[in-house]
Image (cartoon, grey):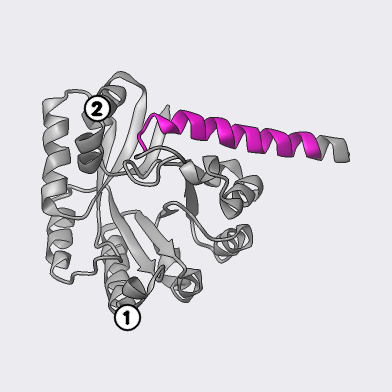
Amino acid sequence: MISDAHFHLKQLLEVSHESAEFIKENDFFGFCSCHTLEEVEFVENFIAQNPGTEKKLEITFGIHPQAPDEKKLKILEKLVSEKRIAAVGEIGLDRFNEEFAATIELQKRLFAVQLEIAQNAKLPVTLHIRKAIPEIFERIQELKKIGKVIFHSYSGTAAEAESILNHGVNAFFSFGNALLNGHKKALETVKILHENRILTETDAPYQPKKGENFSKPQDILLILEKIAEIRSNLSKFSQKSL
């Protein structure tokens, strides 16, 4: 099965119509990340109009840390109560630049509330964390109460990933085209994690391969090949060391 742990269906189909056919024609499963009610309804309509995709697509909804808006909490609560989403996300913390860092206190408040909503609803969470791994360790106790915690496009270090797991968080780390683009921390983390902690994603249409304008679900095939190559080389190295 081709699994995409994180992508944006509405924005993807605006730039890549062939991706709809890829999803429909292949053994595919993906989490569609949404941040507005319009995006949720778009995915729901796509599923309704394409029989069979109800088993291939699940919806996630959360307040993105780059656009922290308390008004969206009511939308999240409504979607949860109506059982229209499979996970809360992407949510989290982002200090990537001055603009995002300026809202960090609001981000933290919304992050805490959304974690509580997910815990009470017994839903997984998908996390967007950039330049904010230290704050994650401040939330370890809350994260331990969540059934599954997915670190979307994980950008921390291998040691930080191991520490999160050692603290008792049921965490999974998702990787995409950063591997194909040579992201050193991503490559190193894929080497050390147990295979059942590794997920694949495209964040389509965002985070494309170098030289391309957008990413798409088809990229998962190349990402899987890259992970297999990394872990195969690691296995060969270990055997030579015996």
Residue 176 in view of the camera: no
Magenta segment, prevailing SS (helix, strand or loop): helix
Q: What's the amino acid at mark 2?
A: Ala
- In front: 37, or 143? 37
Residue 6 in view of the camera: yes
N-term mark: 1 or 2: 2
Crowd around label 2: few <14 · some 14–19 · many ≥20 (10 Å): some
Q: What's the amino acid at mark 1?
A: Glu
Q: Quadrant of the N terminus?
A: top left
Mark 1, secondary structure of its residue: helix
Task: Report the magenta residues as a range.
Answer: 214-237
Residue 163, by quadrant, is: bottom right
Image coordinates of residue 97 in percent, x first then y, are 39, 70
Residue for point 50% across, 30% down: 222
- Membership of 52 in magenta stretch: no
On the image, numbered disc 2 is attached to which residue? 20
Residue for point 20% across, 41% down: 10
Mark 2, secondary structure of its residue: helix
Crowd around label 1: few <14 · some 14–19 · many ≥20 (10 Å): few
Residue for point 50% across, 46% down: 178
Q: Quadrant of the C terminus?
A: top right
User: Is residue 240 placed above or below 91 in the rendered structure?
Assistant: above
Image coordinates of residue 78 in percent, x first then y, are 12, 58
On the image, numbered disc 1 is attached to which residue? 105
Image coordinates of residue 146 in percent, x first then y, are 39, 60
Horizontal relation, residue 3 to residue 54: left or right:
right
Residue for point 17% across, 32% down: 47
Horizontal relation, residue 170 to residue 99: left or right:
right
User: Is residue 70 placed above or below 39 in the rendered structure?
Assistant: below
